[in-house]
Image (cartoon, coloured by chain):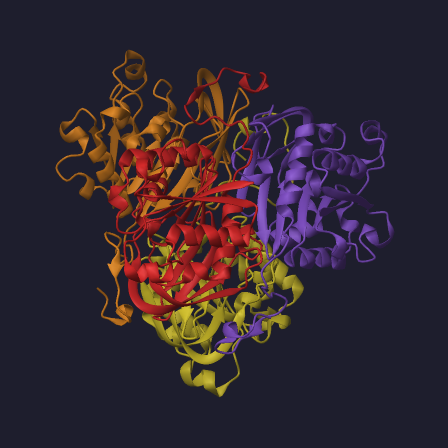
Chain colours: A purple, B red, C orange, D yellow
Amino acid sequence: MTRLTVWCEEPDSAAVREIYPEGLAAAIAAGVHQADQGIEVRTSSLDDPGHGLGDGLLEQTDVLAWWGHHRHHEVPELLAEAIQRRVLRGMGLLVLHSGHLSRPFGKLMGTSCNLRWREADDRELVFCVAPSHPIARGVSPVIEIPRQEMYGEYFDIPAPDELVFISSFSGGEVFRSGCCFVRGQGRIFYFSPGHETYPVYHQPEIQRVLANATRWAHVEQAPAVETADSLNSPVGWFSAPAS
Amino acid sequence: MTRLTVWCEEPDSAAVREIYPEGLAAAIAAGVHQADQGIEVRTSSLDDPGHGLGDGLLEQTDVLAWWGHHRHHEVPELLAEAIQRRVLRGMGLLVLHSGHLSRPFGKLMGTSCNLRWREADDRELVFCVAPSHPIARGVSPVIEIPRQEMYGEYFDIPAPDELVFISSFSGGEVFRSGCCFVRGQGRIFYFSPGHETYPVYHQPEIQRVLANATRWAHVEQAPAVETADSLNSPVGWFSAPAS
Amino acid sequence: MTRLTVWCEEPDSAAVREIYPEGLAAAIAAGVHQADQGIEVRTSSLDDPGHGLGDGLLEQTDVLAWWGHHRHHEVPELLAEAIQRRVLRGMGLLVLHSGHLSRPFGKLMGTSCNLRWREADDRELVFCVAPSHPIARGVSPVIEIPRQEMYGEYFDIPAPDELVFISSFSGGEVFRSGCCFVRGQGRIFYFSPGHETYPVYHQPEIQRVLANATRWAHVEQAPAVETADSLNSPVGWFSAPAS
Amino acid sequence: MTRLTVWCEEPDSAAVREIYPEGLAAAIAAGVHQADQGIEVRTSSLDDPGHGLGDGLLEQTDVLAWWGHHRHHEVPELLAEAIQRRVLRGMGLLVLHSGHLSRPFGKLMGTSCNLRWREADDRELVFCVAPSHPIARGVSPVIEIPRQEMYGEYFDIPAPDELVFISSFSGGEVFRSGCCFVRGQGRIFYFSPGHETYPVYHQPEIQRVLANATRWAHVEQAPAVETADSLNSPVGWFSAPAS
């Protein structure tokens, strides 16, 4: 069983509520659970106590999905650093759409994560360029999203450790839309489809990708590698009984 | 259930039989099955009919483990090409130890795959450098192999898509000993520990790595990407019913 | 000074001669030299003696540019293998457009190198996704090619060691159009723009990319790594005087 | 001409002064200049005004070499962020030895950068695993450092974009000792040899590596990619006159 927490800055907008009446987090969580019932989902919001991540929730989370847009700056620096540390110790992180500018993602990437964008009802085509990747399992070669916000290159991220999807848009732009990163013992997947005023998260193939990514990002049993400190290691330390 | 076929050029040597009385293939297969009972194993030998891969065995194999050393040239070019094509269509391939100079691996890599070597009872230390990788699951940070053939850099392979293990040897050499490659829809893991005159395949941690690698290399359901030919694709091909 | 040999299967077609009256090889060579006068160019053709690579030309070539399309099968296997070996020993290789199915490239990649294609006057947009890469030096963020053959994903290549350009086409397809690979001591750049019935090679930015790629692929002084054979290496071999 | 600034937290220690009477920065700078006279060097110190990087020095620097150890915390957060931004806009960065825990490197990597270590006069052997890489140009396959501090795996960094050197130590440890990272438009090389109480920076091959790395990290003319902000991009923005 994989425990997924879908964290969301719920947009306060009639346009969004029309498409996602229960909210974005609930829609994402329901879609992932429908695609893979082995994933246990819960939701959390920026407006909850502790900015939605109090009471040890991070420690009880195998994979955290993050959707934020206009209120990135309301996530305290200290919380962003706590999330970063938790990822380095093995929590998976799915960064969705406008989460590219969120504080946790920025700290983990080290780059500006800026990109080009346009809200103009572009059609997005999501092409798989890593057909054997677990995140692409059961997904068709092209996912068509009728209307989406355009996100285009240059996307200022480190070269992904694995590039799974590349998108095009009606206006001719391209975008690295599905990117895997490994940082410390944690696994991170950035997936750009998912603007709040389009029903993207209702598409079964998008739900399938998110479920696959949740499984991929869940590190079940890491080796006993210690990264909390730089270790002074006497000669022969590795022959001692496994700690 | 993952179907693993362990193919072996069984060395005809008293020294080997002393360590592996049932043969290398049987020892490797038994070790993998012990580490993960969800893997169904069978063995096959260069001396079997069809060089051990006749009667449609390749099609019934999810992951092929390959151990060969002195008789690489006895594997026909056509068979090596059939294995290569089968990997590109999704079969996993574990290339063990001296298999670095085997024909299937050479064709898939495109490089000489040469390396430095020495038989001198070196101690090998296998360090994990990708602690969240599925192949490292449950493995300790260092595996100590009391006596091994030395394999050292420069190892003439493409840069691995993921580097999981790096080894050192008593003589001071280093070696990229656990390397992941993705080719077409197939996943390949090269793992160097395993000389035939040392009991390496009896070590539980080595068995654990091979079992993990079998799972990792098994692509259960690839997307409907067609690579058997270059496809002339009319405008809008992707909106047609999935072919 | 970098010595570039532009090898070409010159298409025997009035349509091509109209755009490239001196032939494709001459046009490519002239364009590269114009973009960077430090590159010494010569041309060679499949119809020349020795299939255009006799008389030790490979040894006198720092970087080989390869343009072929309909006559890949006329390049003998032995010549393709000689080119492969020469690359592994340090020659650069620029594989242009339809050269993705050439024998030397296929042997170096190990995959089918198949892709989707369409001749329908698509507009191609070439986006840079590696702005600090030497091959992108002085190139604008997007190169617009008014009419091009469409090449689309899935492109069955190993994940590039560095991905420099991604293209889109009018029909919505995307393509990894500028890909770096390192194999042995050789450096390979695949660049897809360049169909023979469009004046792509007359565009200054395309010429700039090819000149930059020639410089990038030229390995001036590799370290004394020996890959022609697997070397039996006694303890302490590295402390001997440099061989 | 490439302008290299060697920044150093000069250790206040008789042991260091014995080996580097002019200081570490001066020794490193002199060594690089001796290896490649096309590199213009200057030095700078944590104890200089503006922590050694005031008066627009960052803007006048093509490549910054960074040596720090015990006083990382004296580099203000704001200065570390300014260095990070300057790298993202194209400055090269060489992070030397104990700089793995420096603030600028940590911010650019996003991981803990912890490792194992030991001061016990280990011999370090530095093996080249990327023989065609510009940083390895003219370097022998193995560099022997008679006495060095041990730095060992697991080294908590992102997988390098290019791995150039792997080291072993007398105690049997291995370490990814020469690692290339591209972040934004900047190029970063981490190189671990160089403990302050050993004469490592006097070795000509180490100087050669640092000079090569300086050249590699110098991005002379990046494409006009804008990353300072996320750009709202109207349809057809790329066809406008190049900005």
The residue most toward the top is C14
* Position in image of residue B159 (x %, y %): 41, 49
Vertical relation: C228 (above or below) D170? above
Look at the image and tell me whether residue B124 can be seen: yes
Q: In which quarter of the image is residue B232?
A: top left
Quadrant placement of the C terminus of chain B: top right
Q: Which residue is drawn at 42% across and 77% down?
A: D122
The residue most toward the front is B21
Vertical relation: A75 (above or below) C239? above
Q: Residue at x 43, y 58 (%)?
A: B201
Q: Which residue is drawn at 46% across and 47% down?
A: B161
Vertical relation: B188 (above or below) A166? below
Left or right of A86 on screen, residue B28: left
* Position in image of residue B117 (x %, y %): 30, 61
Left or right of B192 on screen, residue C9: left
Quadrant placement of the N terminus of chain B: top right
Q: How many marks?
A: 0
* Position in image of residue A31 (x %, y %): 74, 34
Q: A8 or B99, which is in the foreground?
A: B99
The residue most toward the bottom is D14
* Position in image of residue A52 (x %, y %): 82, 50
Left or right of C182 on screen, residue A83: right
Left or right of C156 on screen, residue C55: left
Q: Quadrant of residue B111?
A: top left
Look at the image and tell me whether residue A8 can be seen: no
